Image (cartoon, helix red, strand yellow):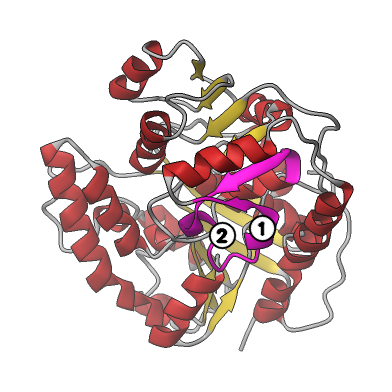
Amino acid sequence: MRNKSKHLHVISFDVPYPANYGGVIDIYYKLVALAEAGVKVHLHCYQYGRAESAMLKGVCHSVKYYKRKVFKNPIYNTKPYIVASRNSTPLIENLLKDDYPILFEGLHSTYYLADSRLKKRYKVVRTHNIEHHYYKHLEKVEDNRFKRYFFKIESDRLKKYEKVLKHADCIAAISPNDQRFFNRKYGKTVLLSPFHVNNSVDVENGVGDFILYHGNLAVGENNEAALYLLQNVLNNAKYPVVIAGNDPSLELRNLVETMDHVTIHSKITSEEINHLISEAHINILYTNQATGIKLKLLNALFMGRHCIANEKMIANTGLENLCVKADTAKEYSKAIQACWGKEVSQNQLEERKSVLQTRFDNKANILPLIEQIYGPSVKAKKVKA
């Protein structure tokens, strides 16, 4: 029987503030939405490099931190490294002090999902990706031999480990594609769209004077996308190009140095990236991996002017009609020419508002999850976050 007191344990794979990369952005703004709906969140964070955050105390009923484990040999383990490194005796002891439901953020945090001591608890797993697909792609784009081997092993382990999801009472998938995948295998899967910083569509008037690609460049997928665009699409662009994101690779930095029309902004905050998104005339996006919904795509549509993206970035997201689609280098170049110097039309803005503020509204989207856990008739209330 589910607990009706509207308390909820949330296990986060990382400290979710500052909300400056995809996974923690979704977690942090979900926490805010839960609090605004009257849920008392007991947050448990695995910590590895990010400091404790006073901001989280203003959102959550309680916050506890646990050190993520570091193994000298990350390959030697039967469980995936991202799971095995996130287990803590104090965490399970804290979970056992009450009978509140538990939200596991990502497969990463599910070490105790199948624990018999939690058998009677209502358990939700938020899936951020199909993780073994994600790690298989990391293997393909990685140049370092050891990392490539690690990603291969991790992908294989994640594929086997994924069946732990049968112990969840509910799986909350981040995209329609992921929902279909998990529901076919395990059932009990609902769609829970990504949570994000945007409250409304807010696009600057007029035109911008540069093209922007942004993303966390420490992630191989994003660094590879930036390289592809510079080498194949933007190498002969007639307009200024800005690449924005932390920790670009040496290869990317060296390539930018050979291009007079391209600048790179690293060591940059989320607020600074959001400013660039708003100021750019075109936000250009590219991915080789069609998993989840990219938060950079949502941000570009909520805040930016024109958005050009490839099929894998937008397929089955519900956002297809809001972007200019391009798959080949020639199509990207043609799309840039078509958008340059033109304002985003009022009709385009109205269509964005219709789609984004209906399907990707944080306050509305949290209610089905709350009803899933506690039952219907939950009234939202405003709290200071």
**39 or 142: nearer the eye?**
142
Alpha-carbon distance for marks 1 and 2?
7 Å
The quadrant of the rendering that contains the N terminus is: bottom right
The quadrant of the rendering that contains the C terminus is: top right
Residue 362 x/y as whole percent: 74, 58
- Residue, x 59% and y 64% (percent of image)? 317
Pointer 1: what residue?
A: 41
- Residue, x 47% and y 71% (percent of image)? 178
Region in magenta:
302-326
**Amino acid bearing label 2:** Val
Position of 121 with respect to 108 (left or right) is: right
Image-quadrant location for residue 337:
top right
Image-quadrant location for residue 249:
top left
Residue 5 x/y as whole percent: 73, 73
Residue 290 x/y as whole percent: 43, 60
**127 or 93: nearer the eye?**
127
Position of 244 with respect to 227 (left or right) is: right
Pointer 1 and pointer 2: residues touching (CB < 8 Å)? Answer: yes
Position of 181 with respect to 212 (left or right) is: left
Give the numbered dot on residue 58: none
Q: Can you see residue 98?
A: no
